[in-house]
């Protein structure tokens, strides 16, 4: 099964060089363990645009869909047999990127 | 034995076993729980007319399996094929006891998974392992029935969506996970022993008894674990005093004033045995073992004046090192008052004020120390605050009498 792992952050600075090294090393263990599916870092929420195409004309709104102090700064998609494995990886991932992470299963 | 008694007994002895067996077979807590509940409902309906079957366990297992299969067929689930295969090849003939016990243990760990909120763990354990109904659990924790139903349903859905494994954690995870299971059992016990809420009995023996029953089960499954033994001993030594703890007038009776002749000697003997067993092991005690040892010292004294307070303070000193929480420090101070006097204890208690300002026992302790020091006015306002915060009816009654005994307010 697959898990969507969000990296939670509350500032607009990106990772430090040390964090990038730690994340690279962690990602290598994901690949080696067969857990790696996909990952990506995201630009600041201020760069987001919300699109509502349900009406006659698409409505564009500047900024993220919800204003909160914390936001998703990046994410991983992992392959793992169950939550316990995902939680172990999440603990290591959180340590590597020095941020909290949220683990959510795909349907 | 009457049919009703036979059903009650089967429910106590077989509920968790049946839920565990069906959970393994169908890999779904929801199906297992509902099928077992339906099997017992069918027993209630049929046994009075047909008589109690010669092998109630086999009858209930067969009935529960049939109910589970009915439900799976009815719902036509996506992963039907796999379940169909399990249904056709019934691979669960009577299991050897060891395997079933292992399954009950898995059920405990699944219900107490750390990814679930603590209140969900309590609810799920009481439902799946304890066999309490949702209305019973809702009443116990003063939550609306629909809210409790939702909490249990959500927890089961989370287990399913995340494939929270149905297994006993590996050796390196076990201590951490077990502490979660024990915390749930202790929470259930405490809610029974100092029940909160104006409408409930001050002592809920249904809950304390259930907590003890489930802890005995864990002890049978993990006999070598010191903290399991410690928690069981702690519960037994606490429960042993329950008859002396609330007066006929519904007022809390403190340890100092309890009629020690009303203590349950059988439970005390069993608790002491467990504490001695842990001492003999030579392994450093954990939190529950230390609390049990403290209670063993209390219950060893025939008269409160014979209490070995220096030993109690020494045990609290050990406990503070393991658990430096303000609540442990408060309880230690109560023992210090007996050993070094209320003035020494009050100085310790007053330092905890920032952290415990909203905790009724903090104000009750201060009130008692101030009263003993003859500082009546300050004692009165501390009692007032304690009464305001206390949720237990017997405790409120006790605090109110103590406050009123201080005499008329000076002005």
Image: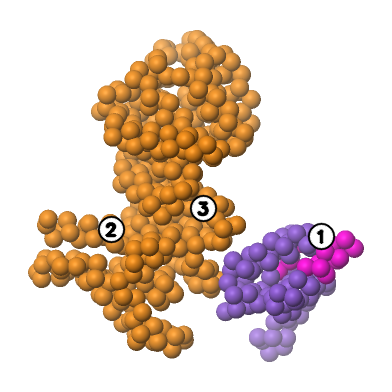
Chain colours: A purple, B orange
**Dot 2 or dot 3, earlier in sequence:** 2
Chain letter of the residue beneath label 1 in the structure image: A
Q: Are marks 3 and 1 in contact (CB under 8 Å)?
A: no
Q: SS class of the residue under badge 1?
A: loop
Q: Magenta segment, which residues?
A: A6-26
Mark 3 sits on what residue? Answer: B178
Chain letter of the residue beneath label 3 in the structure image: B
Chain letter of the residue beneath label 2 in the structure image: B
Q: Which residue is depicted at the point 49% across and 16% down?
A: B338
Q: Is residue B404 magenta?
A: no
Q: Is residue B236 above or below residue B56?
A: above
Q: Is residue B148 left or right of residue B373?
A: left
Q: Residues within 10 Å of mark 3 (few under 14, many from 20)?
A: many
Point out which mark residue A11 bears: 1
Mark 2 sits on what residue? Answer: B13
Q: Are marks 1 and 2 in contact (CB under 8 Å)?
A: no
Whether marks 3 and 1 lie on the same chain: no
Q: Is residue A21 left or right of residue B365?
A: right
Camera-nearest label, 1 or 2: 2
Q: Is residue B162 above or below residue B135?
A: below
Q: SS class of the residue under badge 2?
A: helix
**Observer able to see residue A47:** yes
Q: Which residue is depicted at the point 72% across and 62% down?
A: A92
**Observer able to see residue B142:** no
Q: Position of residue B172 (x, y in %)?
A: 60, 57
């Amino acid at each position: 099964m697959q898990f969507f792992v969000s990296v939670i952050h509350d500032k607009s600075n990106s990772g430090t060089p040390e964090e990038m090294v730690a994340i690279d090393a962690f990602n290598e263990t994901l690949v080696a363990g067969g857990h790696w599916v996909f990952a990506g870092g995201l630009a600041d929420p201020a760069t987001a645009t919300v699109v509502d195409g349900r009406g006659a004309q698409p409505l564009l709104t500047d900024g993220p869909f919800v204003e909160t102090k914390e936001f998703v700064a990046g994410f991983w998609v992992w392959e793992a047999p169950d939550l316990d494995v995902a939680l172990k990886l999440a603990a290591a991932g959180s340590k590597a990127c020095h941020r909290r992470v949220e683990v959510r299963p795909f349907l | 034995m009457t049919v009703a008694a036979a059903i009650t007994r089967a429910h106590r002895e077989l509920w968790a076993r049946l839920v565990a067996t069906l959970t393994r077979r169908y890999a779904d807590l929801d199906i297992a729980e509902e099928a077992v509940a339906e099997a017992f409902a069918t027993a209630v309906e049929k046994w009075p007319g047909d008589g109690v079957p010669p092998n109630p366990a086999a009858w209930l297992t067969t009935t529960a399996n049939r109910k589970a299969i009915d439900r799976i067929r009815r719902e036509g689930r996506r992963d039907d094929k796999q379940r169909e295969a399990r249904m056709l090849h019934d691979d669960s003939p009577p299991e050897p006891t060891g395997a079933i016990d292992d399954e009950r243990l898995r059920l405990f760990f699944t219900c107490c998974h750390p990814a679930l909120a603590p209140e969900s763990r309590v609810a799920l354990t009481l439902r799946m392992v304890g066999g309490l109904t949702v209305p019973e659990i809702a009443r116990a924790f003063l939550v609306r029935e629909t809210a409790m139903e939702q909490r249990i349903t959500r927890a089961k859905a989370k287990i399913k969506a995340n494939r929270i494994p149905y297994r006993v954690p590996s050796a390196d995870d076990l201590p951490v996970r077990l502490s979660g299971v024990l915390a749930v059992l202790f929470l259930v016990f405490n809610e029974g022993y100092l029940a909160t809420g104006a409408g409930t009995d001050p002592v809920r023996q249904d809950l304390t008894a259930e907590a003890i029953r489930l802890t005995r089960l864990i002890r049978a499954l993990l006999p070598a674990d010191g903290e399991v033994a410690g928690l069981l001993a702690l519960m037994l030594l606490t429960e042993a005093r329950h008859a002396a703890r609330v007066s006929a007038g519904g007022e809390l009776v403190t340890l100092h004033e309890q009629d020690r002749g009303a203590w349950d000697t059988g439970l005390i003997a069993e608790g002491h045995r467990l504490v001695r067993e842990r001492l003999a092991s030579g392994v450093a005690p954990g939190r529950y073992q230390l609390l049990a040892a403290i209670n063993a010292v209390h219950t060893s004294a025939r008269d409160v004046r014979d209490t070995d307070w220096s030993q109690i303070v020494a045990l609290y000193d050990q406990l503070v090192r393991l658990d430096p929480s303000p609540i442990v420090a408060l309880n230690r101070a109560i023992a210090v008052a007996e050993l070094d006097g209320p003035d020494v204890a009050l100085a310790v208690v007053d330092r905890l004020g920032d952290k415990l300002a909203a905790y009724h026992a903090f104000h009750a302790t201060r009130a008692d120390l101030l009263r003993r020091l003859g500082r009546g006015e300050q004692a009165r306002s501390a009692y007032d605050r304690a009464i305001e915060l206390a949720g237990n009816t017997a405790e409120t009654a006790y605090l109110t009498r103590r406050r009123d005994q201080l005499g008329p307010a000076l002005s």
